[in-house]
Image (spheres, coloured by chain):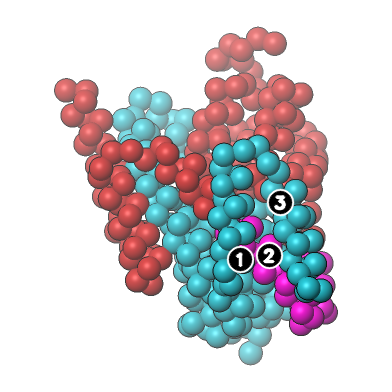
Chain colours: A cyan, B red
């Protein structure tokens, strides 16, 4: 039983690892679809909770794979999720770095650099939409998202300051 | 410090390499990893020069995978080969892995309380805000009509219409890189 689950974790995360252009936020949409709609490992709001945890914690947001793996198959699942999300992309990076330094004159270097950018942009926005959909968001959350995005884009505000203030505000509203 | 291109690579012990990434992994939050690594690797230790680090940053961003982990693989493998990449990545992922499992444990214990739900709802909203802000910053570098069209098509099909992501990305990646290659050739001729 657990072996099938570990295999399922591997099969969900390893392919996503290879296409995570632009980092973890790029594959959130497909991850949510696989975890919630296809495998029914958790509900949409639970997925949104794990997303929030992975964003509040230090380290890359792709560590959500460890949280999902843990939820599905315990500690072994967490390890499997982590290895499956990092090893495939890391092998690609390793190979690409070697190729990069071996082919200084290649015109493909620039093409690769520029060509992958629009894919990252499309996927990142798709990821934001996926989490908003999964979380069944309230008007207050949408407002918070917009304010946070504006602050992070146009000011030097620290993410952790914004998170701390938001957590306090949402907690305080429980008493109103 | 001399910045000769052919400067010999400094000898970096594996443990020291892992230690640097370990420290950065545990202290850097959100998008600040690159800034911390720059301070440790270029300014303090001189393991890489400025240009080299910039290449590392660009590649880490455009290639698949989490940026901090990709940076670790790049720097580690440049300094000590494949094993160096493994050591650096392990140092970078190890501490956050433990921390997130502790958070996951707390979530299982207290995740059902209304208070925990309220706080997580707020944090998820900020998390989406972070994602949007990364998207906006990346989007500024995409100006020409064809790349913009590719970004929009990918967003609409995968984000709005829920088409499967993997075939879409596999189809659009060669198209996008090929277009850039053709444009560069046209400019050159």
* Same subunit: marks 3 and 1: yes
Q: Which residue is denoted by mark 3 in the rendering?
A: A162
Badge 1 element? helix
Marks 3 and 1, the one that precedes in the sequence: 1
C-alpha span from label 2 to label 1: 6 Å
Chain ID, mark 2:
B
User: Local crowd at mark 1 within 10 Å, few (<14), some, or many (≥20)?
Assistant: many
Any magenta on residue A22?
no
Badge 2 element? helix
Q: Are marks 2 and 1 in contact (CB under 8 Å)?
A: yes
Q: Which residue is denoted by mark 1 in the rendering?
A: A141
In magenta, the rendered stretch is B101-130
User: Does residue A33 sit above or below A1 in this rendering?
Assistant: above
In the image, is B176 to the left or to the right of B104?
left
Q: Position of residue B106 (x, y in %)?
A: 82, 72
Q: Position of residue B164 (x, y in %)?
A: 37, 71
Chain ID, mark 3:
A
Position of the C terminus of chain B, as image quadrant, is top left
Badge 3 element? helix
C-alpha span from label 3 to label 1: 13 Å
Corner quadrant of residue B70: top right
Q: Which residue is denoted by mark 2 in the rendering?
A: B122
Tell me the residue at 48%/75% (across/down): A33
Looking at the picture, tell me which residue is in the foreground, B182 or A92: B182
Work out whether residue A27 can be spotted.
no
């Amino acid at each position: 039983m657990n072996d099938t689950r570990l295999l399922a974790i591997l099969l969900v995360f390893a392919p996503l690892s290879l296409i995570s252009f632009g980092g973890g936020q790029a594959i959130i949409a497909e991850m949510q679809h696989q975890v919630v709609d296809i495998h029914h490992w958790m509900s949409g709001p639970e997925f949104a909770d794990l997303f929030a945890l992975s964003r509040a914690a230090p380290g890359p947001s792709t560590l959500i794979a460890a949280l999902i793996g843990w939820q599905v198959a315990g500690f072994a699942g967490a390890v499997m999720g982590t290895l499956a999300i990092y090893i495939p992309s890391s092998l690609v990076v390793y190979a690409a770095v070697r190729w990069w330094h071996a082919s200084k004159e290649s015109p493909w270097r620039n093409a690769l650099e520029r060509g992958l950018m629009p894919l990252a942009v499309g996927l990142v926005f798709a990821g934001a939409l996926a989490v908003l959909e999964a979380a069944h968001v309230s008007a207050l959350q949408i407002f918070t998202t917009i304010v946070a995005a504006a602050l992070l884009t146009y000011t030097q505000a620290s993410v952790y300051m914004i998170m701390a203030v938001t957590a306090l505000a949402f907690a305080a509203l429980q008493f109103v | 410090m001399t910045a000769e291109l052919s400067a010999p690579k400094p000898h970096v012990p594996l443990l020291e390499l892992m230690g640097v990434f370990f420290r950065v992994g545990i202290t850097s939050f959100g998008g600040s990893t690159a800034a911390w690594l720059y301070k440790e690797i270029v300014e303090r230790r001189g393991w890489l020069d400025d240009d080299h680090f910039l290449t590392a940053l660009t590649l880490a961003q455009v290639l698949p995978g989490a940026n901090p982990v990709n940076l670790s693989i790049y720097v580690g493998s440049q300094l000590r080969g494949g094993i160096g990449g493994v050591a650096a990545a392990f140092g970078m992922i190890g501490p956050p892995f433990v921390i997130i499992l502790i958070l996951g444990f707390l979530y299982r214990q207290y995740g059902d309380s209304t208070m925990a739900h309220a706080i997580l709802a707020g944090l998820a909203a900020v998390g989406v805000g972070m994602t949007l802000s990364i998207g906006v910053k990346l989007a500024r570098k995409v100006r020409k009509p064809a790349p913009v069209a590719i970004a929009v098509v990918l967003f609409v099909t995968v984000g709005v219409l829920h088409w499967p992501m993997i075939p879409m990305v596999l189809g659009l990646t060669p198209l996008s890189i090929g277009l850039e290659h053709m444009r560069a050739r046209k400019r050159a001729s």
